[in-house]
Amino acid sequence: MEERLIWRHTQCPSMDELSNNSEPVFDKHVSKNPPESPILYDTILVQLNSPRTKRLNNESTVRNWRSSLAFFASTLKKFSADDLRLEEMFEQLLDDIERSLKETTLAISTLDTYTQVLHAKLLMFAEVDERIRKDVKQGIRNIRKKQKRTVPKLEAVDDAMIVQWLGNLDGYCNDPKSAPNLFKLGRPTSKMAYKNTMSLHHMLLLRGYVW
Protein backbone atom coordinates (compact mmCIF):
# COMPACT_ATOMS: atom_id res chain seq x y z
CA MET A 1 0.00 0.00 0.00
CA GLU A 2 2.79 2.38 0.92
CA GLU A 3 4.65 1.56 -2.30
CA ARG A 4 1.47 2.30 -4.34
CA LEU A 5 1.09 5.74 -2.76
CA ILE A 6 4.76 6.49 -3.43
CA TRP A 7 4.25 5.54 -7.11
CA ARG A 8 1.23 7.82 -7.48
CA HIS A 9 3.14 10.68 -5.91
CA THR A 10 6.11 10.29 -8.23
CA GLN A 11 4.16 9.55 -11.44
CA CYS A 12 1.06 11.81 -11.22
CA PRO A 13 1.50 15.61 -11.20
CA SER A 14 -0.15 17.55 -8.43
CA MET A 15 -2.72 20.35 -8.99
CA ASP A 16 -0.03 22.96 -8.26
CA GLU A 17 2.21 21.41 -10.88
CA LEU A 18 -0.64 21.46 -13.44
CA SER A 19 -1.41 25.10 -12.76
CA ASN A 20 2.24 26.07 -13.12
CA ASN A 21 2.72 24.07 -16.30
CA SER A 22 3.05 26.29 -19.39
CA GLU A 23 1.37 23.72 -21.64
CA PRO A 24 -2.47 24.03 -21.73
CA VAL A 25 -4.54 21.07 -20.59
CA PHE A 26 -6.98 21.49 -23.52
CA ASP A 27 -6.38 22.61 -27.09
CA LYS A 28 -8.33 25.87 -27.10
CA HIS A 29 -7.45 26.68 -30.70
CA VAL A 30 -9.94 24.15 -32.05
CA SER A 31 -12.90 25.84 -30.40
CA LYS A 32 -11.91 29.24 -31.79
CA ASN A 33 -12.42 28.17 -35.39
CA PRO A 34 -15.97 29.20 -36.37
CA PRO A 35 -17.99 26.63 -38.33
CA GLU A 36 -18.51 27.35 -42.01
CA SER A 37 -21.76 29.18 -42.63
CA PRO A 38 -24.27 26.88 -44.39
CA ILE A 39 -25.67 27.88 -47.76
CA LEU A 40 -29.12 29.46 -47.91
CA TYR A 41 -30.72 26.55 -49.75
CA ASP A 42 -29.74 23.96 -47.15
CA THR A 43 -30.90 26.06 -44.20
CA ILE A 44 -34.25 26.77 -45.86
CA LEU A 45 -34.78 23.12 -46.74
CA VAL A 46 -34.20 22.07 -43.13
CA GLN A 47 -36.85 24.53 -42.00
CA LEU A 48 -39.37 23.39 -44.62
CA ASN A 49 -38.85 19.76 -43.62
CA SER A 50 -39.20 20.41 -39.91
CA PRO A 51 -42.27 18.97 -38.14
CA ARG A 52 -43.00 22.39 -36.67
CA THR A 53 -43.38 24.00 -40.09
CA LYS A 54 -45.69 21.23 -41.27
CA ARG A 55 -47.69 21.41 -38.06
CA LEU A 56 -48.19 25.19 -38.03
CA ASN A 57 -48.92 25.80 -41.73
CA ASN A 58 -51.36 24.52 -44.32
CA GLU A 59 -50.07 21.93 -46.74
CA SER A 60 -50.80 24.20 -49.71
CA THR A 61 -48.82 27.02 -48.10
CA VAL A 62 -45.77 24.83 -47.54
CA ARG A 63 -46.08 23.50 -51.08
CA ASN A 64 -46.07 27.09 -52.36
CA TRP A 65 -42.91 27.80 -50.36
CA ARG A 66 -41.29 24.73 -51.86
CA SER A 67 -42.19 25.88 -55.37
CA SER A 68 -40.49 29.21 -54.71
CA LEU A 69 -37.45 27.41 -53.28
CA ALA A 70 -37.23 25.21 -56.38
CA PHE A 71 -37.45 28.24 -58.67
CA PHE A 72 -34.62 30.10 -56.93
CA ALA A 73 -32.63 26.95 -56.05
CA SER A 74 -29.65 27.66 -58.33
CA THR A 75 -29.25 31.10 -56.77
CA LEU A 76 -29.78 30.07 -53.15
CA LYS A 77 -27.15 27.33 -53.49
CA LYS A 78 -24.44 29.92 -54.17
CA PHE A 79 -24.67 32.04 -51.03
CA SER A 80 -24.74 31.86 -47.25
CA ALA A 81 -26.42 34.34 -44.91
CA ASP A 82 -23.01 35.82 -44.06
CA ASP A 83 -22.17 36.26 -47.76
CA LEU A 84 -25.02 38.75 -48.15
CA ARG A 85 -23.31 41.12 -45.72
CA LEU A 86 -20.74 41.79 -48.44
CA GLU A 87 -21.69 44.38 -51.07
CA GLU A 88 -20.25 42.38 -53.95
CA MET A 89 -22.07 39.18 -52.97
CA PHE A 90 -25.33 41.04 -52.41
CA GLU A 91 -25.11 42.53 -55.91
CA GLN A 92 -24.41 39.09 -57.34
CA LEU A 93 -27.51 37.72 -55.58
CA LEU A 94 -29.71 40.37 -57.19
CA ASP A 95 -28.08 39.76 -60.58
CA ASP A 96 -28.86 36.04 -60.30
CA ILE A 97 -32.45 36.75 -59.29
CA GLU A 98 -32.88 39.15 -62.20
CA ARG A 99 -31.49 36.54 -64.60
CA SER A 100 -33.88 33.88 -63.29
CA LEU A 101 -36.87 36.19 -63.66
CA LYS A 102 -35.81 37.20 -67.17
CA GLU A 103 -35.28 33.67 -68.50
CA THR A 104 -38.47 32.08 -67.15
CA THR A 105 -41.74 31.65 -69.01
CA LEU A 106 -43.92 31.62 -65.89
CA ALA A 107 -46.81 34.04 -65.55
CA ILE A 108 -46.18 37.43 -63.97
CA SER A 109 -48.59 36.66 -61.13
CA THR A 110 -46.66 33.47 -60.35
CA LEU A 111 -43.35 35.33 -60.31
CA ASP A 112 -44.82 37.98 -58.01
CA THR A 113 -45.82 35.21 -55.60
CA TYR A 114 -42.43 33.49 -55.77
CA THR A 115 -40.47 36.70 -55.17
CA GLN A 116 -42.69 37.67 -52.25
CA VAL A 117 -42.17 34.24 -50.68
CA LEU A 118 -38.42 34.56 -51.25
CA HIS A 119 -37.82 37.73 -49.26
CA ALA A 120 -40.66 37.32 -46.75
CA LYS A 121 -40.27 33.64 -45.83
CA LEU A 122 -37.35 31.79 -47.40
CA LEU A 123 -34.68 34.30 -46.42
CA MET A 124 -36.19 34.45 -42.96
CA PHE A 125 -35.89 30.65 -42.71
CA ALA A 126 -32.24 31.06 -43.76
CA GLU A 127 -31.71 33.46 -40.83
CA VAL A 128 -30.79 36.40 -43.06
CA ASP A 129 -30.76 39.72 -41.20
CA GLU A 130 -33.97 41.73 -41.43
CA ARG A 131 -32.15 44.73 -42.92
CA ILE A 132 -30.74 42.58 -45.71
CA ARG A 133 -34.16 41.01 -46.35
CA LYS A 134 -35.62 44.49 -46.76
CA ASP A 135 -32.85 45.40 -49.19
CA VAL A 136 -33.53 42.22 -51.19
CA LYS A 137 -37.24 43.11 -51.26
CA GLN A 138 -36.49 46.59 -52.60
CA GLY A 139 -33.99 45.21 -55.11
CA ILE A 140 -36.53 42.72 -56.45
CA ARG A 141 -39.17 45.46 -56.62
CA ASN A 142 -36.85 47.54 -58.80
CA ILE A 143 -36.11 44.54 -61.02
CA ARG A 144 -39.80 43.75 -61.49
CA LYS A 145 -40.62 47.39 -62.35
CA LYS A 146 -37.90 47.44 -64.99
CA GLN A 147 -39.02 44.14 -66.46
CA LYS A 148 -42.67 45.13 -66.61
CA ARG A 149 -41.72 48.21 -68.64
CA THR A 150 -39.97 46.04 -71.23
CA VAL A 151 -42.53 43.21 -71.52
CA PRO A 152 -43.55 42.83 -75.20
CA LYS A 153 -47.20 42.97 -76.12
CA LEU A 154 -48.86 39.58 -76.22
CA GLU A 155 -50.24 38.22 -79.47
CA ALA A 156 -53.96 38.88 -79.78
CA VAL A 157 -56.26 35.87 -79.49
CA ASP A 158 -58.33 35.53 -82.68
CA ASP A 159 -61.19 33.21 -83.66
CA ALA A 160 -58.89 30.78 -85.46
CA MET A 161 -56.81 30.28 -82.31
CA ILE A 162 -59.94 29.67 -80.23
CA VAL A 163 -61.17 27.07 -82.72
CA GLN A 164 -57.77 25.33 -82.52
CA TRP A 165 -57.86 25.30 -78.70
CA LEU A 166 -61.37 23.85 -78.66
CA GLY A 167 -60.32 21.19 -81.17
CA ASN A 168 -57.39 20.21 -78.96
CA LEU A 169 -59.68 20.05 -75.95
CA ASP A 170 -62.13 17.78 -77.77
CA GLY A 171 -59.24 15.52 -78.72
CA TYR A 172 -58.06 15.35 -75.10
CA CYS A 173 -61.57 14.34 -74.01
CA ASN A 174 -61.50 11.47 -76.50
CA ASP A 175 -58.09 10.37 -75.26
CA PRO A 176 -57.31 11.82 -71.79
CA LYS A 177 -53.96 10.00 -71.65
CA SER A 178 -52.71 12.19 -74.51
CA ALA A 179 -53.48 15.40 -72.61
CA PRO A 180 -50.74 17.32 -70.81
CA ASN A 181 -51.32 18.44 -67.24
CA LEU A 182 -53.58 21.38 -67.99
CA PHE A 183 -53.73 22.30 -64.31
CA LYS A 184 -49.96 22.81 -64.28
CA LEU A 185 -50.02 24.73 -67.56
CA GLY A 186 -52.73 27.02 -66.25
CA ARG A 187 -51.17 27.49 -62.82
CA PRO A 188 -47.81 25.91 -61.88
CA THR A 189 -48.66 26.15 -58.17
CA SER A 190 -52.01 24.39 -58.57
CA LYS A 191 -52.81 21.58 -56.13
CA MET A 192 -53.22 19.31 -59.17
CA ALA A 193 -49.89 20.29 -60.77
CA TYR A 194 -48.20 17.18 -59.43
CA LYS A 195 -50.41 14.77 -61.42
CA ASN A 196 -48.91 12.96 -64.40
CA THR A 197 -52.16 12.33 -66.26
CA MET A 198 -55.54 14.00 -66.70
CA SER A 199 -58.74 12.13 -65.84
CA LEU A 200 -61.74 12.04 -68.20
CA HIS A 201 -63.89 13.49 -65.41
CA HIS A 202 -61.71 16.60 -65.16
CA MET A 203 -61.46 16.93 -68.94
CA LEU A 204 -65.26 16.87 -69.35
CA LEU A 205 -65.67 19.44 -66.59
CA LEU A 206 -63.16 21.72 -68.30
CA ARG A 207 -64.80 21.19 -71.68
CA GLY A 208 -68.21 22.06 -70.31
CA TYR A 209 -66.81 25.17 -68.58
CA VAL A 210 -65.13 26.41 -71.77
CA TRP A 211 -68.19 25.87 -73.93
Image (cartoon, rainbow, N blue to C red):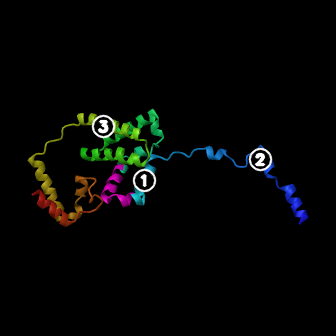
The numbered mark at residue 141 is: 3
Instruction: Report which residue position mark 2 lands on.
Output: 19
Please, is residue 171 above or below residue 157 in the view?
below
Please, is residue 173 above or below residue 82 in the view?
below
Furthest-front residue in this view? 16
What percent of the width, then of the height, locates residue 162?
11, 51
Q: Is residue 3 left or right of residue 21?
A: right
Q: Regarding mark 2 in the picture, which secondary structure is present there?
A: helix
Q: Main secondary structure of the magenta part?
A: helix
Closer mark to the observer between disc 2 and disc 1: 2
The numbered mark at residue 135 is: none
The mark that comes first in sequence, 2 or 1, is 2
Q: Nearer the viewer, residue 209 or 34?
A: 34
Q: CA distance from mark 2 to mark 1?
A: 48 Å
Q: Residues within 10 Å of mark 1 (few under 14, many from 20)?
A: some
The mark that comes first in sequence, 1 or 3, is 1
Q: Mark 3: which amino acid?
A: Arg
Residue 67 painted magenta: yes
Q: CA distance from mark 2 to mark 3?
A: 61 Å
Q: Residues within 10 Å of mark 3 (few under 14, many from 20)?
A: some
Instruction: Report which residue position mark 1 lands on.
Output: 45
